Image (cartoon, grey):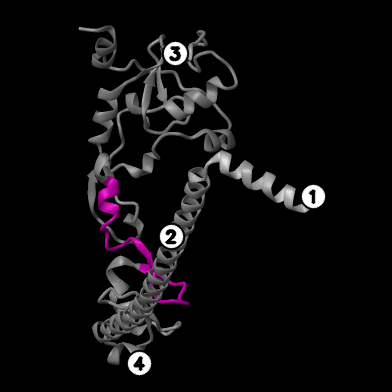
Amino acid sequence: MSAHTCCEMEAPEPRASVELPAVQIQIMSGGYDLNLFASPPDCNFLCSVCHGVLKRPVRLPCSHIFCKKCILRWLARQNTCPCCRKEVKRKKMVHVNKLRKTIGRLEVKCKNAEAGCLVTCPLAHRKGHQDSCPFELMACPNEGCSARVPRGDLAEHQQHCQQGGEQLCLLGCGATLGPAERARHNCYRELREAWSERQERSRTLLLSLLRRVRRVHRTTNLIRRQLAQLGNFLEEDDTLLLGTVQEAEATPVGSTDAEVWGSQGQRAL
């Protein structure tokens, strides 16, 4: 068995209480409030710094256990154990997960106990109960209403809410409706009409795009014909040029010189 596991298996030793001013305790508190629990927790589950029930407990090399938040705040000011004053290195702190799970099984009262909720549940399940507790205060969803009412009374409050009197469509279309609008609201018909309008706009855009494509096609054909004509003109020019060169090459050089001398003699006479 590893040293880490052995440390977790050992029962926490009784710890000396660290006396701190009330204001400082309130500021440094990182544990659970004692009034949260259905019955007083064991003294070995208490943090010597904040005097609350250990939250995310960590064990120091000297075997003293504290809330992680509490001891980190303490070590930010001095690097000694709050109980025995031995020097502490943060790297040697160990999370006591077994103790954390044990504390998570302690029965706690609902945060709305003073409002009338009598439910108790394990500490680890407290958040799940709070999300469904009928005594949990909820904000009225009606726009303009700032009232906060228990979850169990929210539906009745919405029916009689006079502050704005508007709420979101229950069918989920996202519309904000007043009392009179809710009676005649038909989001399916409105959505269908909106869809028809969108389809009509799409059809118009498609027709416009097709007309532009036809114009581009006609222009492309015209350019293709003009390029073909230009190619024909260039071929004819090449043919004429080639014929001229061939005639020049076929004429004898001597006859050309005789013609030149003959023309010069005529001019001399």
> For the magenta stretch, what is the residue range?
126-149
Q: Marks 4 and 2: which is nearer the front?
A: 2
**Residue under the point 28% across and 84% down:** 196
Q: Dots 3 and 2: beta carbons under 8 Å?
A: no
- Image marks 1 and 2: residues in contact by CB distance under 8 Å: no
Residue nearer the viewer, 201 or 216: 216
Looking at the image, is mark 1 or mark 4 nearer the viewer?
1
Disc 4 residue type (three-letter): Ala
Q: Nearer the viewer, mark 3 or mark 1?
A: 1
User: Please, is residue 109 above or below residue 144 in the view?
Assistant: above
Q: Is residue 168 visible?
A: no
**Label whose residue precedes the other's in the sequence (1 or 4):** 4
Q: Give the mark nearer the N terminus: 4 vs 3.
A: 3
Rendered view: 231 above or below 128: below
The N terminus lies in quadrant: top left
Q: Are marks 4 and 2 in contact (CB under 8 Å)?
A: no
Badge nearest the viewer, 3 or 2: 2
Q: Residues within 10 Å of mark 3 (few under 14, many from 20)?
A: few
- Label at residue 231: 2
Rendered image: mark on residue 180: 4
Does the residue at mark 1 contact the one at mark 4 (Cβ under 8 Å)? no
- The amino acid type of the residue labelled 3 equals Lys
Q: Residue at x 67, y 46 (%)?
A: 260
> Regarding mark 4 in the picture, which secondary structure is present there?
helix
Residue 41: image location, x then y, percent: 30, 33
Q: Quick one: 203 or 107, which is closer to the camera?
A: 203
Residue marked by disc 3? 91
